[in-house]
């Protein structure tokens, strides 16, 4: 089961973190940008090439430190088809380096549209008698607030292809409580969503006790993390909001079970843009990213003991 693979990679590296790959051109060192622009021009083609070179360097620097990477589709979509091609190449390259890949796509739709998304990101696209893997991520993020039927095509794809999914439950943004913390009967909306996610994967628990249906639970809400960990004992957590958004190592400890398993914490800007704080010219972006990832690992390790 896919989350078993992720958990084993976490235990192997003693590091329950995932590095987000969400680059904008202005966050890429000048020497990479200038080199790409010189060959491909200063438009979308040059920007996409710079993103690819930056991603490849980050993956090379991090592949023996972090167990996973999480490219966010929006940063590739904004560059058009060239950007999506770079996302596909990024996923392939991360797999070559032994990394688990979470495609942060936050898709959510009904019926045949949900099935098409599941095909593209997880299961593969059938053309004639052949099925072609497209992005072939190990895991996707989803918005399930349209109901459980919108998640079923993804769950079917997960079961058939040994994949997994994270569903938005309690998000890290400041405005999340405007809807997610509204009362819904005797529960709050985020709690109802958590119950739905836990139920959806029932009976599919893997080696470590977790189903392929995970939950996105923000580091910026530690009390809600405590509540959800108790409420969702068989659900693996993806925890955004660490670092730049204000979540701390002390906060994220509540996402883990008593064995220090069952969660992975994301950081994007604090790792990807670490080079901007070294005082150099960006040629050290690999070393800076690696140092930031190691610091995050060690900070969380002070609170979370695995095994």
Image (tube, rainbow, N blue to C red):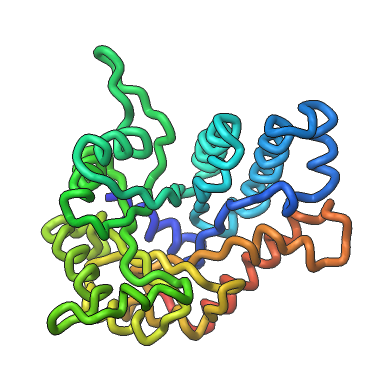
Residue at x 37%, y 65% (from the top left corner): 216
- Above or below, 253 against 11 in this view is below
Residue at x 79%, y 29% (from the top left corner): 41
Q: In the rendering, at what x and y percent does residue 217 appear?
A: 37, 70
Residue at x 33%, y 53% (from the top left corner): 142
Residue at x 51%, y 34% (from the top left corner): 88
Give residue 20's quadrant in the image.
bottom right
**Residue 3 is at least partly visible in this image:** no
- Above or below, 254 against 75 in this view is below
Report the front residue among 114 and 156: 114
Q: In the rendering, at what x and y percent does residue 17 appear?
A: 50, 65
Report the front residue among 182 and 65: 182
- Above or below, 295 against 38 in this view is below
From the viewer's perspective, is 195 left or right of 82?
A: left
Q: How many marks?
A: 0
Give residue 19's quadrant in the image.
bottom right
Q: In the rendering, at what x and y percent does residue 47 appear?
A: 71, 38
**Residue 76 is at least partly visible in this image:** yes
Q: In the rendering, at what x and y percent does residue 290 appear?
A: 68, 60
From the viewer's perspective, is 187 left or right of 28?
A: left
- Residue most extreme to the right: 280
Which quadrant is the C terminus positioned in? bottom left
From the viewer's perspective, is 253 left or right of 46?
A: left
From the viewer's perspective, is 82 left or right of 125?
A: right
């Amino acid at each position: 089961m896919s989350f078993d693979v992720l958990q084993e990679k976490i235990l192997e590296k003693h590091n329950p973190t995932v590095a987000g790959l969400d680059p904008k051109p202005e966050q890429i060192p000048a020497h990479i940008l200038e080199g790409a622009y010189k060959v491909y021009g200063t438009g979308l083609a040059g920007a996409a090439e710079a993103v690819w070179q930056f991603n490849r360097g980050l993956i090379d620097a991090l592949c023996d430190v972090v167990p996973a990477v999480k490219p966010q589709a929006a940063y590739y979509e904004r560059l058009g088809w060239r950007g999506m091609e770079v996302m596909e190449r990024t996923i392939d390259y991360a797999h070559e380096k032994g990394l688990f890949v979470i495609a942060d796509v936050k898709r959510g739709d009904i019926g045949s549209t949900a099935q098409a998304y599941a095909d593209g990101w997880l299961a593969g696209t059938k053309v004639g008698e052949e099925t072609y893997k497209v992005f072939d991520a190990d895991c996707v993020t989803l918005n399930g607030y349209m109901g459980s039927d919108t998640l079923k095509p993804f769950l079917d794809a997960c079961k058939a292809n040994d994949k997994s999914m994270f569903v938005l439950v309690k998000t890290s943004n400041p405005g999340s409580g405007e809807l997610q913390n509204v009362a819904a009967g005797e529960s709050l909306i985020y709690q109802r969503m958590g119950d739905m996610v836990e139920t959806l994967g029932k009976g599919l628990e893997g080696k470590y006790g977790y189903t392929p249906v995970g939950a996105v639970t923000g580091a910026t809400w530690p009390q809600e993390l405590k509540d959800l960990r108790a409420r969702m004992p068989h659900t693996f957590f993806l925890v955004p909001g660490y670092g730049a958004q204000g979540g701390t190592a002390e906060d994220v400890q509540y996402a883990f079970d008593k064995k220090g398993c069952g969660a992975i914490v994301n950081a994007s800007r604090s790792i990807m843009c670490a080079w901007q704080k070294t005082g150099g010219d960006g040629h050290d972006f690999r070393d800076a990213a690696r140092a930031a990832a190691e610091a995050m690992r060690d900070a969380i390790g002070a609170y979370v003991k695995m095994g």
